Image (cartoon, rainbow, N blue to C red):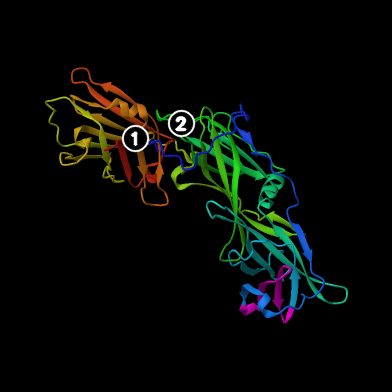
Amino acid sequence: MKYFFKILLTLVLAVAIVFGMYYYTNGNPFEKQENASVLTTVSKPAATEKDTKRELLASLPKDDYYLYKSTNGVVLKHNKKEYEFTNWSRLIDVEAPEMFLNDYDGDGEKELLIKAVSAKNASSGEMEYELYLLDKQKTSSGKTTYKVYLASKSTWGDILDKQIREEVRQLKSCKKIIQFAMHYKNKSLRYDKKTGIAKNGFVNYGRALQDDNGDYLTFNKWTKGKGIYSINEENEICVSVEVLIGYKKSEVIQTIGHINFKLDFDGGMFTVKRKTMNFTPENAYKVSDPRTAVNEQWSYLENNANKKSVEVPKTLGWIQYAPELSKDMLTQTIDLTQKDTDIKLVSKIHICENYVALVAKSGCAFDKSIQGKGEYSVIINKGTDKEYEISYTSEIRERGKKKKQEVLRIYFDRAYARDEIDTILITYGSR
């Protein structure tokens, strides 16, 4: 979008860190640790306590699981037996833990998963969570114990560092587009030399920020922000990790989107579930996939039925217009007199695969300060899941020799097929 958005997240970049590369691979390093930390192996029943000393934290009554906070830690009650766990989160009772049953390791037997608060931000009240996966074990004497595997706030970072290759680039062919590409660690990512578009891997795109002149900032570096664990309706473990972007000559950081994936559990290790890795941009930074650019040409022309010239020179400073597109019609003539924006001072609207052009009536001129600040946009398919802001750059030129007319041309971020555009909304300036 050609409006300079208010930045959702503003942080001061560390002055001592200088990134001179055009792209940066794998973000900031994370402290290394095992993917799944083994906390406790339960080998004895819980200590006997009075009921008044226990607090019920969570339960799955249908499956006969009850979790209590006790004096020494937490106690799990199942099938009339109790198991005590120590060194779990000290904030486990700040918010009721959630309990889930699922076959996380594929052995045909369901494991118990507990999601609990691990930290709380004192100023914002925001919670951080960690996961406890309880793997049932049988001792040589036939007794049941549980081995507990922890997915902490740093586990997802270690998983991404060890298992996934991540690379972020600003496309050579279009500075508007930031490309986030991922592949398995033992695979290489390949790129088109001319455009910079990735040819393989898991790829998605977000929109770069703009300066006060509407120019797209130059990508400098990226890093991973906060990671969040969640459990979906199928009781699968889901992870969402912020992707933060920094730009040259700018002190802002953009939360452009999130890395999303699911976790499997195998051999005491949390691993990325196959075919679940993706990058999702924030809604405000969605862009269409540049890999779907078309070569076909098409054209739509809309003429203003009111051809009367203006007597007094006028400046076009506020336009918002949605042409009545028809896939079966290449040219239409519509009376724009009653429109409440300056579109009534436009004689022609031309739309094709690469751009939209507005031809001002003779004697009228576009407010060039608007074009200079990049305060324009072209939105297609508004209100649908295929809504995109597709404008990229613009220019104002003159046409005609006797009756000179100004033409505003807004170029798209790629070439679009006619079938990709159901509706189109053109905006220039603001009220």
Residue range corresponding to the magenta coloring: 61-81
Label 1 residue SS:
strand
Residue 268: assigned label: none
Q: Is residue 94 left or right of residue 176?
A: right
For residue 94, above or below residue 376: below
Q: In this figure, which residue is indicated by the disc labeled 2?
A: 216
Q: For the residue marked with disc 2, what is the amino acid? A: Tyr
- Whether residue 80 can be seen here: yes
- Whether residue 106 can be seen here: no
Real-space Cα separation, disc 2 to disc 1, in angstroms: 14 Å
For residue 52, above or below residue 154: below
Q: For the residue marked with disc 1, what is the amino acid? A: Tyr
Q: Residue at x 45, y 38 (%)?
A: 294
Residue 379: image quadrant is top left
Residue 303: image quadrant is top left
Count of numbered circles on the image = 2
Residue 376: assigned label: 1
Q: Nearer the viewer, residue 207 or 85?
A: 85
